[in-house]
Image (cartoon, rainbow, N blue to C red):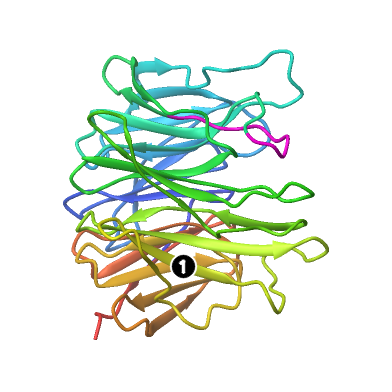
Amino acid sequence: VVLKGHTQGVSAVAWAADGRTVATAGDDRTIRVWDPASGRQITSLPEIAREGSGGPIVDFTADLKVVAINDWGEITIRTAADGKVLVKIDPILDRGQKSAFRPGVFAIAFSPDGKRLATAGSVAAVGGRHGLPGSIVSVWDAETGKIVHRSDKLSTAASSVTWSKDGKRFAAGTNGAGGELPEAGELRVWDAETGKVLHSFRAKPAVEPGEWVSVGDVAFHPDGQRVAVPVTAGSRGTPAGLLIADKAASVRVWDLGTGKATQPLKGLKTSVTRVVFSPDGNRLATAGSDKIVRVWDVESGQDLSALAFPDRIAAVTFSPDGKSLAAGSKDGSVRIWEVPAAR
């Protein structure tokens, strides 16, 4: 099924927990709800954000009844049916009015029960020795808008945030820094109850001058004991997404019990920007700059299928039963596939 209605790129795709509907959000500042079997649009919510460069950052609760929308660094939590504002949140606690850097929010995520909202992005103040803005990952009460946890300042901007299936942990990935004072992107995992950092992993032990190494997305395995991240490396003079002999794009999976990392996927040739586990944890879907969604067997690393798109892919997610996969593209379309089972 191909879902057509958005007039600009699709940035968010979510299945309802019962699998009966799919919600999407796009740079056209609309939210749309669909029947995934027929491709029929059920309803839409227009003008969810102000006009301007880029589109809003959106996340839905598991039942798709409530939506959080980040619009130019201001977050509203609304009912998805009619857009009624329930809560307003100012997620940027350090606006640094005298700084040259503009703070921002790059990722938001509801906890599985919908009671909390995590935000990740950048602050105006310098975060590391490289002279770039650092970041803060925060957790908010979704009913009151009050802050629950605030992380220490991370060295570089956080581009992703997610929760474990049981809601006991949340994790974020950072972009890293290049130039003369490079710094590797990192993965951090926090305890959702206490806000304490449980794990901190660098994408690479050391980064050479001119090199950059980024952790662009984060996905918890359903067992809560493993976390997958896409790691992309490059160097000065090399266009982003292209590889040179001593650099690589990979998906790394950290075991939170042992602290050890594996690279289960072989043969990646372009950068990966999105990763997501299937509900049973046996498959992993990746999307990258080659405009293809690939589905992998987690244990064997075997490439099970390659699903081509006409444009870059910004969002990808499995259905609750794991039998289908939906992905949204920069061309405004959403495609739903039946995906193969792990072997």
Residue to which mark 1 is pinned: 251
Name which residue lies at 42% across and 22% down.
76
Q: Is residue 142 magenta?
A: no
Name which residue lies at 18% across and 64% down.
321
Left or right of 177? Residue 72 is left
Q: Is residue 118 above or below residue 238?
A: above
List x then y, in percent, for residue 160.
47, 45
Q: Is residue 132 magenta?
A: yes
Q: How many marks?
A: 1
Name which residue lies at 70% across and 79% down.
245
Name which residue lies at 31% across and 32% down.
196
Quadrant including the C terminus = bottom left
* Magenta portion: prevailing SS class: loop
* Amino acid found under the numbered disc labelled 1: Val
Q: Is residue 169 above or below residue 93?
A: below
Residue 48 appears in the picture as rendered? no
List x then y, in percent, for residue 45.
41, 34
Q: Is residue 294 above or below residue 104?
A: below
How crowded is the residue under tag 1: few (<14 C-alpha within 10 Å), some, or many (20+)? many
Q: Quadrant of residue 130?
A: top right
Residue 33 appears in the picture as rendered? yes
Check the image and name the residue furthest to the right. 237
Left or right of 109? Residue 7 is right
Q: Nearer the viewer, residue 19 or 270?
A: 270
Magenta stretch bounds: 128-137
List x then y, in percent, for residue 248.
61, 72
Q: Secondary structure at mark 1?
A: strand
Q: Nearer the viewer, residue 91 or 309?
A: 91
Quadrant including the N terminus = bottom left
List x then y, in percent, for residue 208.
71, 59
